Amino acid sequence: MTQQTLLFIICFFLSASSAQDRLSGACIGVADGDTITILTQDKQQHKIRLAHIDCPEKGQPYGTRAKQFTSDFCFRKSVVIVYEGKKDRNGRVIGEVFNEQGENLNKALVRAGLAWHYKKYSQDAAYSNLEERARAARIGLWQDPHPIEPWIWRKNR
């Protein structure tokens, strides 16, 4: 099965809701754990902010590990972005990132204990459950007895 065929299959199964849009392309940049840049076939660059989550910031404990995890997951690889037409205040598309195997980067980061479920902007129970499991297992940043949420970290900087 070719990459294009696999991406088509992923897009087909992700199209359950007509309210969702999709972008596909190669990941050409990883700014941090929850921000990537993709290049589509028509040579358009799109900055993507991962939906539902917030990763530790640069300089914050686990910030480098989150960025490395994201890079290992998708840098220089084909990805599909599923989004609802929303952009953040910086003009980034807010979406979920899927690799060629159909794995969800956003959920993988939470599962690995490298991101918080960003409940201010997401009510998705799947992300809450993943965070609760990672916390209970003391995975990743949950090893720290008092991890600081990135939105509080940014506010205090």
Image (spheres, rainbow, N blue to C red):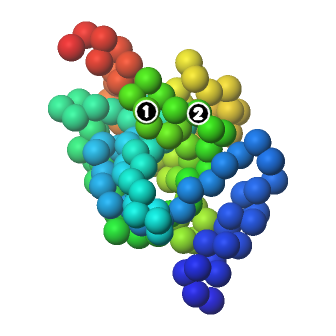
Q: What number is the disc on residue 27?
A: none
- Between residues 140 and 2, which one lies in front from this camera angle? 2
The N terminus, quarter of image:
bottom right
Q: Secondary structure at mark 1?
A: loop
- Examine the rendering and report whether any part of residue 108 can be seen: no
Q: Is residue 142 above or below residue 5?
A: above
Q: Does 34 sit above or below residue 37?
A: above
Could you tell me how far apart the alpha carbons at marks 1 and 2 are, in whole angstroms? 9 Å
One can see residue 68 in this view = yes
Residue drawn 68% across and 64% down?
11
Q: Amino acid at mark 2?
A: Lys
Residue denoted by label 1: 91
Which quadrant of the structure image shows residue 14? Answer: bottom right
Q: Secondary structure at mark 2?
A: strand
Report crowding for label 1: few under 14, some 14 to 19, many 20 or more residues within 10 A (C-alpha).
Answer: few
Q: Is residue 52 left or right of residue 72?
A: right
Are the residues flagged by discs 1 and 2 in contact, CB closer than 8 Å? no
Would residue 6 appear left or right of 77 to someone viewing this image? right
Residue at x-position 76% and y-position 63%:
13
Q: Position of residue 29 (x, y in %)?
A: 30, 55
Residue at 47 percent across and 69 percent down: it is 41
Residue 73 position, x and y percent, is: 41, 62
Residue neighbourhood size for the residue with mark 2, other residues' Cα within 10 Å, grouped as few (<14), some (14–19), many (≥20):
few
Sequence-first tag of 1 and 2: 2
Tell me which amino acid carries mark 1. Answer: Gly
Q: Residue furthest top?
A: 156
Residue drawn at (35%, 24%), measured in percent from left and top? Answer: 150
Look at mark 2 in the image and give the residue it sits on: 86
In the image as oriented, which residue stretches furthest toward the left?
A: 59
Image spot of residue 124 (x, y percent): 68, 33
State which quarter of the image contains the C terminus.
top left
State the residue lying farthest toward the bottom.
Answer: 1
